[in-house]
Amino acid sequence: MRRDIHLNMKNKEISDIYIQENNRTEVTEFLLLGFQVSRGLRLFLFCLFLVVYCLIICGNLLIITLVSTSKNLHTPMYFFISHLSISDILLSTDIVPNLLHILLNNGGTMTFIGCITQLYFFATSEGFACFLLAVMSYDRYVAICNPLRYSSIMTSGHCVILTVICWLSECSVTLIYTITITTLNFCRPNIIDHLFCDSIPLLELSCSDTFIVHLEIYVIGIPDVFIPTTIIVMSYTYIVLAILKISSNTGRQKAFSTCSSHLIVVSIFYGTLFGVYVVPTNGQTLTMSKILSLLNTVFTPLVNPIIYSLRNDDIKKAVQKTLHKRVIW
């Protein structure tokens, strides 16, 4: 009798282990909760984000088109701005359409492969923007501190090489830890209380030891953020020192105006980025975390073309010239 009880208990343990193993391997999709609010508020947010997404696409496509077609915009600075617009389109397209689906359905499922794909393109576009903003600050440093050598340093070939390095390095770096994440086992419940598949909420669902993944993210992420930040700080330190040496106020204003738009974009981008990933989240509500993520993934791609168009006379002239041609035609 005791032996039968012992065998039954053993079989139950084996069955429980089998079920646990199945729970680890059966998680093939995740449930993204989004904003758990009333239907009326969700519909309002849906309309708001739909309009914002259309503005992001139109604004950034306008920048890309103007830079491609206007000869007076064929300069290194506008070449980099056009690639920043490409990155903004990639980021918003990766996040917003699925966010709209989540808002309409009060949550939405995403396959494991879809989740990893979204994470990869999100991290790649964010990392690329970090490096590109650093390259753009270097471009402004050369333009203000070494104006006589600017054309020989920032050649078209040099600009293309720098941009390709930014794209390839970030695509490769992000691929490393996303591949590692795919080797992890995930347990139920498969619920992500967030707006999209980000690395932190995704790793919290893993049953496996995530030490290696966290180590990879820190080892890769720290240089990924702090190297560009160091380049930007050093570039603007030299730029400010050079501007202060200019005797006339008109000369100072003109020199500062050439980099003011970029400085605003850098401040917004790094402000939201550090707010989401660097500032301690102790005591931070999930709603606040979601709002900060929205500022980083939706607000920044929206304001970038606005800043570069409203504060840039060259782009204004290119828009006017293009509209004038259309009217004549």
Image (tube, rainbow, N blue to C red):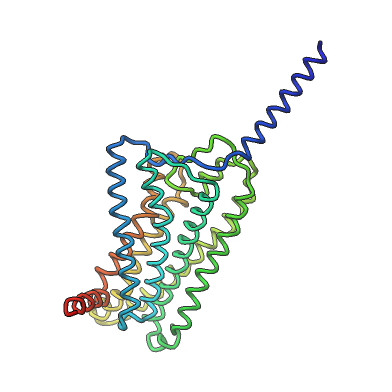
State which quadrant residue 223 falls in. Answer: bottom right
User: Left or right: where does residue 156 sit relative to residue 2?
Assistant: left
User: Left or right: where does residue 130 sit relative to residue 41?
Assistant: right
In this rendering, is residue 26 above or below 256?
above
Instruction: Looking at the picture, tell me which residue is in the foreground, 309 or 318.
Output: 318
Instruction: Looking at the picture, tell me which residue is in the foreground, 153 or 9.
Output: 9
- Residue 324 in the image: state x and y as whole percent: 18, 78
- Residue 26 in the image: state x and y as whole percent: 60, 38
- Residue 307 in the image: state x and y as whole percent: 29, 66
- Residue 259 in the image: state x and y as whole percent: 33, 73
In this rendering, is residue 152 above or below 93?
below
**Quadrant (top left/top right/bottom left/bottom right) for the N terminus:** top right
Q: Which residue corresponds to the image point at 31% horizontal and 40% vertical from the top-left?
A: 42
Instruction: Looking at the picture, tell me which residue is in the foreground, 236 or 46.
Output: 46
Q: Which residue corresponds to the image point at 60% horizontal and 59% vertical from the top-left?
A: 176
Report the residue that reaches farthest toward the top: 1
Q: Which residue corresponds to the image point at 53% horizontal and 65% vertical from the top-left?
A: 170
User: Left or right: where does residue 29 sit relative to residue 57?
Assistant: right
Q: Which residue corresponds to the image point at 39% horizontal and 89% vertical from the top-left?
A: 148
**Quadrant (top left/top right/bottom left/bottom right) for the C terminus:** bottom left
In this rendering, is residue 179 above or below 5?
below
In this rendering, is residue 41 above or below 161?
above
User: Left or right: where does residue 79 sit relative to residue 246?
Assistant: right
